[in-house]
Amino acid sequence: MKITRREMGVGLGLAMLFGPMLGNVARERVAFAGPSKTAKRLFLFFTPNGTIPNRYWPQGSGTSFSFAPGSITEPLAAIKSDLVMCKGIDFKGFDNHEPGMHGMLTGDPNAGAFGGASVDQYIAKKLPVASRFRSIELGVLTDPWGAQTQTRMDYAGPGMFMNPQQDPQAAFKRLFGDLVGGGADAGGAVDALAARRKSVLDFLKTDIGSMRSKLGANERRKMDDHLAAIRSVEQSLFPMGGGGSPASCGTPTAPGAADPNAQASFPAIGKAQMDLAVLAMQCNLAPVVSLQWSHTVSPVVFSWLGLTGGHHDLSHAQNDDFVKAERWYAEQFAYVVGQMKQRGLLADSLVVWVKELADSSLHNAVSVPFVMAGNAGGALQTGRLIDFGGASHHKLLASIAQGMGVDASPLGADADGLPGLFT
Amino acid sequence: MRIVATTRAFALCLVASAAVGYACAPSDSSHLGYKNDAPDPAADGGTAPVVPAGMSDRRIRRLTRDEYASTLKDLLSTQKDYGASIPVDQVVHDFDGNADVLEVDALFADQARQNAEDIAAAFDLNQVGCNASQGVDCAKAFVKSFGARALRRPVTGDEVDRYATLYTSVGTFDAGVRTIVQAMLQSTGFLYRTELGVETKDGFDLTPYEIASELSYLFWRTMPDAELTQHAASGDLAKPEIVAAQVARLLASPRANAMLDAFVDQWLYVGQLGQAQKDAATYPSFNEGVRTDMVGEAHAFFENVARDPQGSLSTLLTATYSYVTPSLAQFYGVQPGQGGGTFARTEMGADRGGILTLGSVLAFEATPIAANPVRRGKLVRVRLLCQDMPPPPPGVAAKIPPLDPKAPNRPKFTQHDADPSCAGCHKLLDPIGFGFERFDGVGRLLPGTIDTTGEIKGSPTSDTTFDGVRDLETKLAASTDVRACFVRQWVRFGLGVSDTESAAGEVTRLAKLFTDGGATIGALLTAMTQAPYIFRRDKETIPSP
């Protein structure tokens, strides 16, 4: 679909069309001991229920390693030169499903390492506001159990989930609706709709303040959080700092209809969400994007592979069916990295495939599988397998922050990150 | 979305603790639950801590996703589901209405904006009742009439002025009216219901409109209808006897099915049966029709017991009948029901009866290829006894033995008894689940001689041995623990409160009224709606802005 001036301008504000592109926005950084070159964007990719260590890790080390035939990570062979297999990174002081899900990105399920926020949100808040969204969270079948610590990995703060959107059509409308004329304009002029949106946002801010004044101290946090949400909406509609570069987006295509709650739709929904994530990055809609497949203790049955057991049950049996399911996830990771490369996004991106457990049967967190991809703007030399020998995963979180040019000082002794990861 | 409490992972996997001698201490919610519910304020860097509201505290409640969607359906007389794009609610104890955690986050706000814009753009201006020639006076009249329904109360003078200013800023009549709709459907008055009241000498009296919303959202999960609104307008809803009469009307209405179905969906996970995958080779007769009918059966059974003047917790557990379709009757191997309706009442035979033998419950608490005594034991432990199981300690080794779907489960799980590190927790789960061995992974009766003896251990006052689910249900029906737990689940579900000490006190008070009322569900719902928190709140200092 052709993007016209009229459609593109709705609510986004015309200034952004001529504004600076995200990559040109000067970042004011605190001096820190990070790499001299950094990534422009972070993409987190989660799959659940741990792995079978001896069928996961490639053989070899450094630049000399290979994926065994039939192993879980063999599908990554196609993108071997674009990734770093990060072995020997442990969660310290916690393991198992729910703590793993909660602590994987926050650093710790109890105390947290970034005051309760997950590393992606910590980074998103530190970066200058330069795009429509600080971050975008997409999910695949993340909602059937409701929002709870087992089903959420991204946290705005202690106990505050960043809910992923698991419906690609709704996500598409949110991210690209105005660009392709899917907005709510009922015939009025573009500028008029933008003006109405501005008026309504101002009205809502007053309205929230009015409600807040009627509340006791304990309930006021609800209005404070609501106001912050309205400010996020405002930024997405009337972005300060440029707001991305729709001109580089290509042609957004709306995902087809599929029930996001149906397990049979899992591959189709997943494909749509991966494509949306890549497109969102290509359009510079947010510096931080995450894609969460299901959640810990995931019961998804990979019926499209002919499997009959639920993913979590298989993860305990650690049988060939589990390997098949895990290989399928590896294929998805290879696909999305391939798409990023094809669109020229990989060189200045940092991509991390994260998991919440190491050995799926032992429920432990010793050498949790982490894979990085992308060159992080030149900081990350790929095509390697590195064994960090039992390093705390706080070092990994520090490296992720550093790779995005963000100081990781809350991590204290681990703030320097993983040794030898970045150049 | 904020976290108050957690957890359901544990029994979904078979866990054997490597920490020898690990003692499993289930937490009785009435003693410990509230501690789990209170996040550490010190950890809440920068933003205000979540202190769960007590029973008598003034508060606001964001509409749940379901409530938001059904309110828009009623307000706009549409069948469109505007909840589909709204993020799913945070669940606390697997219930969706906890007011302490329901907030408007960035995704919610943006999707509500999108919905409001879509609705405004399509809004039929003929509904406005006046036109451009009356200008801002028409806009104000519309704000009052549409707002009275959207906000579930009269619009204040200050609000009318603010909406009029918004209208005027837009320029044209049509766009101005649409902008009013667009703003109102994102406003706090629409997205939240208030339990704030009007200040009196010694506290706050909730307004009749607030009471109307409490009742309506509790019983119908949507905005008040005309009759409730009328009683709010006349002010007589502040009288307990008027509330009682309205409660009887609301419960008798088919519209209360929304509430009754939601309770059983969330209490016993009936609503999640759609997510329970079943292996077609192992269970060829378990088709989508059976699955749908099982959910319908659970709803019909619960609705009928709840509306039966004699329908009690005991009835739920020990009824010999259920409500089935002809094809579900065939699946179970019972006679089709007599009488009208899609789901007709029928006797379920010697081995089946009571809510724990519903196909929906049995099939959900199983794997895709087999029954699972751990899951079934945990259901009883957590949902009927309100004993939350702790997560396994660090360093567990959890190997699931290969499962033969044809073989009984008991021998496979005896490893838990043999290993002392397993036994700590599994003695609390497996022996209850073994009582379900007559039922396979999709809720059918298995033939032949099957050991269905079981045991409840480690409960406050309900320890017992039993043989088969019906015997278990009879014993659970006599348990004061189960009665208190049932009340607690309704307090969580219906009142949207966390497990605070004041909530625990209210559970104790209601449990007595419940028992005195013959433990009928009607008695419980009546007691809940005659309670002080329906009518008033404690004194509180409102800080200056």
Image: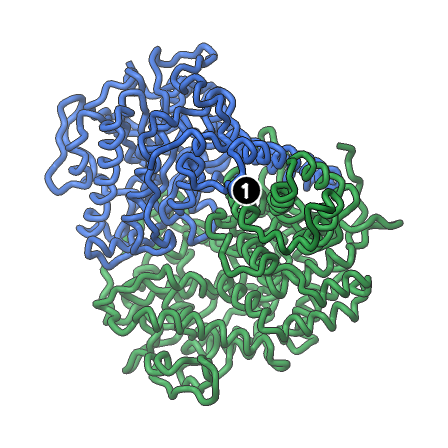
Which colour assignment does the render follow? by chain
Residue type at the position of mark 1 = Arg
Residue at 23% of width from left, 36% of height from top?
A335
Q: Which residue occupies the foreground of this view, A224 or B525?
A: A224
Residue count near mark 1 (Cα–Cα under 10 Å), binned few <14, some 14–19, many ≥20: many
**Chain B as rendered: colour:** green
Question: Relative to residue B263, is residue B60 drawn left or right?
Answer: right
Pinpoint the chain carrying mark 1: B
Say which element carries label 1.
Answer: helix
Q: Is residue B254 above or below residue B494?
A: below
Quarter of the figure with residue A88: top left
Q: Position of residue A53 (x, y in %)?
A: 23, 39
Q: Residue furthest right?
A: B201
**Closest to the observer, B453 or B218:** B218
- In percent of width and height, residue B374 lies at 38, 62
x 89%, y 49%: residue: B201
Q: Image height check: is B154 above or below A38? A: below
Q: Residue furthest left?
A: A69
Chain A's shade in the image?
blue
Residue B362 lies, with reference to residue B222, above or below; the image says below
Quadrant holding the N terminus of chain B: top right
Task: Count every numbered label the image shows and give the total.
Answer: 1
Q: Position of residue A298 (x, y in %)?
A: 35, 50
In the rendering, at what x and y percent does residue B198 appear? 81, 50
Residue A156 falls left or right of residue A291: right
Residue A209 appearing in the image: yes
Residue corresponding to mark 1: B113
Q: Nearer the viewer, residue A269 or A390?
A: A269
